[in-house]
Image (cartoon, rainbow, N blue to C red):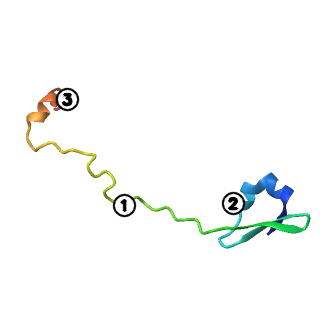
Amino acid sequence: MTVTMQEAQAKLPELIRNLAEGEELIVTEQELVVARIVAERRPAFQRPGPGLCKDMITIVSDDDEHLKDFAEYMP
């Protein structure tokens, strides 16, 4: 796709969003090529891996001592 510098200035974000992977946008000024923009592959969303909260949570020992503070909330 080829556009003039004025067209590129007016709607560059839209032009870039509409490029397919590997497609090239050529910007010209006075019929001379001044820039080439090539669309790259958009990375797929990756789910975060396990272990991101490591060491952020402390598990209290398995006794009932700490539950006394919550006795009024328990059935």
Q: What percent of the width, then of the height, locates residue 12?
A: 75, 56
Q: Is residue 69 above or below residue 45?
A: above
Residue hosting label 3: 73
Residue hosting label 1: 49
Residue hosting label 2: 17
Q: Residue 31 occupies which quadrant of the picture? A: bottom right
Q: Nearer the viewer, mark 3 or mark 1?
A: 1
Instruction: Report the residue at 19% width, 29% height from top.
Output: 73
Q: Amino acid at mark 3?
A: Tyr
Instruction: Report the residue at 72% width, 55% height from top.
Output: 13
Q: Is residue 38 above or below residue 6?
A: below
Q: What percent of the width, then of the height, locates residue 39?
A: 67, 67
Q: Nearer the viewer, mark 3 or mark 2?
A: 2
> Dot 3 lies on which element?
helix
- Looking at the picture, tell me which residue is in the foreground, 32 or 1: 32
- Looking at the picture, tell me which residue is in the foreground, 11 or 27: 27
- Looking at the picture, tell me which residue is in the foreground, 67 or 13: 13
> Dot 1 lies on which element?
loop
Q: Amino acid at mark 1?
A: Gly
Q: Is residue 24 above or below residue 10?
A: below
Instruction: Report the residue at 71% width, 72% height from top.
Output: 23
Q: Earlier in the sequence, mark 3 or mark 1?
A: 1
Label 1: few (<14), some (14–19) or many (≥20) C-alpha neighbours in 10 Å: few
